[in-house]
Image (cartoon, rainbow, N blue to C red):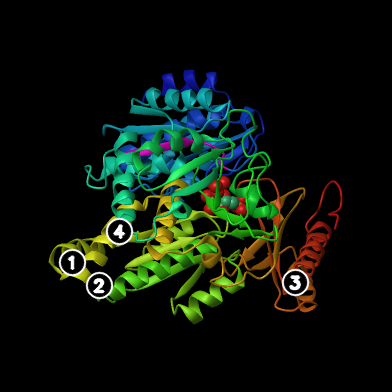
Amino acid sequence: MDLGAITKYSALHAKPNGLILQYGTAGFRTKAEHLDHVMFRMGLLAVLRSKQTKSTIGVMVTASHNPEEDNGVKLVDPLGEMLAPSWEEHATCLANAEEQDMQRVLIDISEKEAVNLQQDAFVVIGRDTRPSSEKLSQSVIDGVTVLGGQFHDYGLLTTPQLHYMVYCRNTGGRYGKATIEGYYQKLSKAFVELTKQASCSGDEYRSLKVDCANGIGALKLREMEHYFSQGLSVQLFNDGSKGKLNHLCGADFVKSHQKPPQGMEIKSNERCCSFDGDADRIVYYYHDADGHFHLIDGDKIATLISSFLKELLVEIGESLNIGVVQTAYANGSSTRYLEEVMKVPVYCTKTGVKHLHHKAQEFDIGVYFEANGHGTALFSTAVEMKIKQSAEQLEDKKRKAAKMLENIIDLFNQAAGDAISDMLVIEAILALKGLTVQQWDALYTDLPNRQLKVQVADRRVISTTNAERQAVTPPGLQEAINDLVKKYKLSRAFVRPSGTEDVVRVYAEADSQESADHLAHEVSLAVFQLAGGIGERPQP
Ligand code: G16
């Protein structure tokens, strides 16, 4: 380690005095102007992690669903997963070290993690379309090079594409080719193979409107569309040509406001979807004949996918264990439907893909989705091998189902939730099953719900337990929520500090929209009073 060079370069990426940041739900996120030092230091950390794991590590510069002025960074571990928890702690220590302590912290991490500093390191970097991203990714590169790491800068990528690249590189190409072409070809080939089997391939199944949140998803979908156009034609909206990133559009806006994005004209019963700013989330929606808006969120996506996978397994004659993983935000109706109608075990974890992904790995087939549209399906290596064999050996009808499953496995991005990959999976399933968007929506009826945000002086005063469904601190808050919930039928509410924005999130559901709205508002007031609310009191 050339400590002199590190000190010299670090001074060029100096930390603002007193700024403390936390590696949160999906890495560091805050105003872009506060992140230069964090980027440089994450470049350093990625090199150490690469040396330790003897693998390629990814660094993604994005703040996903956050406003355009924000930015963020997260590290991607060898198999395309989120960074291991102990390294998240190192990331927080390194990002917050004052200049004079940087060297000591770097040495401490290397010693604690037994990093062989002589080992080579390789880091791949991707970034979203935010105006600040290019310069910030250059700071990551500075960090990588000053510690002697090699790197490949992929430039503009969706977050899940970077996860895919890391996974491919560390599995000797078995998962796919670590190029953007490789990604397009792998997914499109599987999609076209699947849709060829669909008996319902009329216009209704062939066209889809996509709101790209004015983000990277538009660029990448445009590059990719001709690869799969045989099976699907996409019409892009909010493609970044005029609007602001995530502003009044995108998956987070549509899900939290329960209304369509601006900039998209929707005819009745037309199938539409929205990506978020870095294309790792997707939600679907449509307007019915009476002009009512219907949202199909991550819970219904998980239901569609897991029921299709279950049907294929029955046809093949395999009894494998499928599990569905959700978070506290999952609509009560979805959990009930999965458990009682589909007879699939459902598990609840804390918010954050890393928690869901980890749990889903426990099953032969693990389907995980957050209600906000972030998710994918994971298949164990044994399952993948078994299905490949079945696709070659079984007799006709079973072989066809096994072949389908083989293609579905290829179509999922198993490294991370991926809006493009999920969109193609959903479109293929709808076409194969001959389901309209209304029929899909009718699987069950969501309980009316509402999500709100509350500003407090320090959101860390709220701590939770039981997969974030209960507040432990501040004292009295959970009791207040319990009392409020009792006032409404079929109701449930919880609060948790966001890991990506400086807010406390409030979720409530009940038997009517009015009740859900009231309950969410009352819980917001309780948070404001008991957890140090700042600014204006929450308004109904
Ligand atoms: C990130 C995480 C998601 C999480 C979301 C909101 O999404 O990857 O798992 O649901 O933040 O997290 P929080 O409620 O803690 O702010 P994205 O799409 O912004 O990367």
- Disc 3 is placed on an element classified as loop
Q: Position of residue 56 (x, y in %)?
A: 31, 38
Name the residue: 42% across, 19% down.
5
Q: Quick check: marks 4 and 1 in contact, CB under 8 Å?
A: no
Question: Crowdedness of circle 3 by 10 Å Cα count: few (<14), some, many (20+)?
Answer: some
Picture layout, residue 138 above or below residue 486: above
Q: Is residue 180 magenta?
A: no
Q: Quadrant of residue 180?
A: top left
Q: Is residue 359 visible?
A: no
Left or right: 171 as drawn, with respect to 5: left
In terms of sequence position, does the residue under pointer 2 or pointer 1 come before the other? Answer: 2
| Figure check: 152 above or below 325 | above
Is residue 517 in view? yes
x and y percent of residue 91 in the render?
A: 49, 41
Which of the two residues, 6 or 330, is positioned nearer the viewer here?
A: 330
* Contact flag, marks 2 and 1 (Cβ < 8 Å): yes
Q: CA distance from mark 4 to mark 1?
A: 18 Å
The amino acid on which the numbered mark 4 sits, given as a three-letter code, is: Gln
Which residue position holds label 4?
Answer: 197
Front one among 279 and 426: 426
Q: How far apart are the two marked residues, 4 and 3, measured between alpha carbons?
A: 41 Å
**Callouts 3 and 2 close, C-beta under 8 Å:** no
* Residue drawn at x 44%, y 80% as measured from the top left: 343
Mark nearer the N terminus (3 vs 1): 1
| Residue linked to disc 2 | 316
| Distance (Cα) linking label 4 and label 2 | 16 Å
Residue on which the image places disc 3:
512
Q: Which residues are magenta?
A: 56-64
Q: Marks 2 and 1, how far apart in space?
A: 8 Å
